[in-house]
Image (cartoon, rainbow, N blue to C red):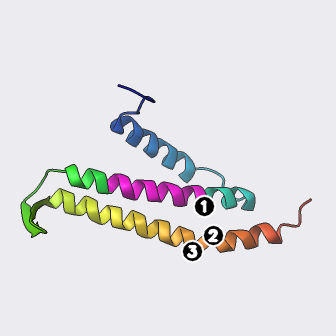
Amino acid sequence: MTGASIMPATVAAAHLEACAAALAGADVSDPDDIAMIVPTLLRAQRHLARALNTISRHAVGGQSSSVEFMGETLVSTELSAVLSEAADAAASTAEALEEALPFLDDVEDDDTRS
Protein backbone atom coordinates (compact mmCIF):
# COMPACT_ATOMS: atom_id res chain seq x y z
CA MET A 1 0.00 0.00 0.00
CA THR A 2 1.45 3.37 -0.97
CA GLY A 3 0.85 6.79 0.48
CA ALA A 4 -0.93 7.55 3.72
CA SER A 5 -2.46 4.73 5.71
CA ILE A 6 -6.21 4.56 5.21
CA MET A 7 -8.48 3.71 8.13
CA PRO A 8 -10.70 0.67 7.42
CA ALA A 9 -14.30 1.66 6.73
CA THR A 10 -15.60 -0.35 9.68
CA VAL A 11 -13.22 1.46 12.04
CA ALA A 12 -14.17 4.84 10.55
CA ALA A 13 -17.88 4.05 10.97
CA ALA A 14 -17.36 3.06 14.61
CA HIS A 15 -15.35 6.24 15.17
CA LEU A 16 -18.13 8.29 13.56
CA GLU A 17 -20.69 6.72 15.88
CA ALA A 18 -18.54 7.37 18.97
CA CYS A 19 -17.94 10.98 17.98
CA ALA A 20 -21.63 11.58 17.25
CA ALA A 21 -22.55 10.08 20.65
CA ALA A 22 -19.99 12.32 22.39
CA LEU A 23 -21.32 15.38 20.58
CA ALA A 24 -24.91 14.45 21.43
CA GLY A 25 -23.97 14.44 25.13
CA ALA A 26 -21.72 17.50 25.04
CA ASP A 27 -22.43 20.89 26.57
CA VAL A 28 -23.08 23.09 23.54
CA SER A 29 -24.41 26.13 25.37
CA ASP A 30 -21.53 28.42 24.41
CA PRO A 31 -22.34 30.46 21.27
CA ASP A 32 -18.66 30.44 20.27
CA ASP A 33 -18.67 26.64 20.35
CA ILE A 34 -21.84 26.54 18.27
CA ALA A 35 -20.27 28.89 15.73
CA MET A 36 -17.40 26.41 15.36
CA ILE A 37 -19.48 23.23 15.52
CA VAL A 38 -22.11 24.01 12.87
CA PRO A 39 -19.65 24.52 9.98
CA THR A 40 -17.87 21.33 11.04
CA LEU A 41 -21.17 19.44 11.04
CA LEU A 42 -21.94 20.87 7.61
CA ARG A 43 -18.69 19.46 6.21
CA ALA A 44 -19.29 16.16 8.01
CA GLN A 45 -22.77 15.83 6.49
CA ARG A 46 -21.33 16.40 3.02
CA HIS A 47 -18.76 13.66 3.63
CA LEU A 48 -21.47 11.38 5.03
CA ALA A 49 -23.62 11.92 1.93
CA ARG A 50 -20.67 10.96 -0.31
CA ALA A 51 -19.89 7.92 1.84
CA LEU A 52 -23.49 6.71 1.74
CA ASN A 53 -23.59 7.16 -2.04
CA THR A 54 -20.41 5.09 -2.38
CA ILE A 55 -21.75 2.39 -0.07
CA SER A 56 -25.07 2.32 -1.93
CA ARG A 57 -23.27 1.60 -5.21
CA HIS A 58 -21.73 -1.51 -3.67
CA ALA A 59 -24.65 -2.65 -1.52
CA VAL A 60 -26.30 -5.99 -2.17
CA GLY A 61 -29.47 -6.92 -0.38
CA GLY A 62 -33.15 -7.36 -1.09
CA GLN A 63 -34.69 -7.66 -4.51
CA SER A 64 -32.83 -6.18 -7.42
CA SER A 65 -34.05 -4.21 -10.37
CA SER A 66 -32.23 -2.99 -13.42
CA VAL A 67 -32.54 0.07 -15.59
CA GLU A 68 -31.01 0.69 -18.98
CA PHE A 69 -29.25 4.06 -19.01
CA MET A 70 -27.11 5.35 -21.86
CA GLY A 71 -26.36 1.85 -23.08
CA GLU A 72 -25.44 0.49 -19.64
CA THR A 73 -27.52 -1.65 -17.35
CA LEU A 74 -27.62 -0.25 -13.84
CA VAL A 75 -28.60 -2.75 -11.16
CA SER A 76 -30.12 -1.52 -7.93
CA THR A 77 -31.13 -3.48 -4.87
CA GLU A 78 -33.55 -2.50 -2.14
CA LEU A 79 -30.63 -1.93 0.22
CA SER A 80 -28.88 0.20 -2.37
CA ALA A 81 -32.03 2.28 -2.84
CA VAL A 82 -32.41 2.85 0.91
CA LEU A 83 -28.77 3.86 1.26
CA SER A 84 -29.14 6.22 -1.68
CA GLU A 85 -32.13 7.83 0.03
CA ALA A 86 -30.07 8.18 3.21
CA ALA A 87 -27.35 9.90 1.17
CA ASP A 88 -29.94 12.33 -0.17
CA ALA A 89 -31.12 13.01 3.39
CA ALA A 90 -27.55 13.69 4.54
CA ALA A 91 -27.08 16.07 1.61
CA SER A 92 -30.32 17.84 2.55
CA THR A 93 -29.09 18.16 6.13
CA ALA A 94 -25.89 19.74 4.84
CA GLU A 95 -27.93 22.22 2.80
CA ALA A 96 -30.00 23.11 5.87
CA LEU A 97 -26.85 23.60 7.96
CA GLU A 98 -25.45 25.84 5.23
CA GLU A 99 -28.52 28.04 5.59
CA ALA A 100 -27.61 28.50 9.27
CA LEU A 101 -24.14 29.93 8.55
CA PRO A 102 -25.26 33.58 8.14
CA PHE A 103 -26.95 33.39 11.54
CA LEU A 104 -23.68 32.30 13.12
CA ASP A 105 -22.10 35.52 11.89
CA ASP A 106 -24.88 37.34 13.74
CA VAL A 107 -24.04 35.45 16.93
CA GLU A 108 -20.39 36.42 16.65
CA ASP A 109 -21.33 40.08 15.94
CA ASP A 110 -23.68 40.17 18.97
CA ASP A 111 -20.97 38.88 21.31
CA THR A 112 -20.07 41.77 23.58
CA ARG A 113 -17.49 39.92 25.66
CA SER A 114 -14.00 41.39 25.52
User: In the image, residue 106 lies at what x, y percent?
Assistant: 74, 73
Q: Few, some or many C-alpha atoms within 10 Å of disc 3 (few <14, some 14-19, many ≥20)? A: few
Alpha-carbon span between mark 3 and mark 1: 10 Å
Residue 38 badge = 1
Q: Is residue 22 left or right of residue 110?
A: left
Secondary structure, mark 1, is helix
Secondary structure, mark 3, is helix
Q: How many marks?
A: 3
Q: Nearer the viewer, residue 57 or 10?
A: 57
User: In the image, residue 71 lies at what x, y percent?
Assistant: 9, 66
Residue 101 badge = 2
Q: Few, some or many C-alpha atoms within 10 Å of disc 1 (few <14, some 14-19, many ≥20)? A: some
Q: Is residue 47 left or right of residue 104?
A: left
Q: Are marks 2 and 3 in contact (CB under 8 Å)?
A: yes
Image position of 96 with respect to 51: above or below? below
Q: Is residue 111 left or right of residue 72?
A: right
Q: Are marks 2 and 1 in contact (CB under 8 Å)?
A: yes
Residue type for callout 2:
Leu
Q: Main SS type for the magenta part?
A: helix
- Tell us which disc is closer to us: 2 or 1: 2
The residue at 39%/26% (across/down) is: 2
Residue 40 in magenta stretch:
yes
The residue at 20%/49% (across/down) is: 58
The residue at 68%/74% (across/down) is: 103
- The stretch in magenta equals 38-52
Residue type for callout 1:
Val
Q: Tag 1 or tag 2, which sits nearer the N-term? A: 1
Alpha-carbon span between mark 2 and mark 3: 6 Å
Judged from this view, the residue extending furthest toward the front is: 71
Residue holding disc 3: 99
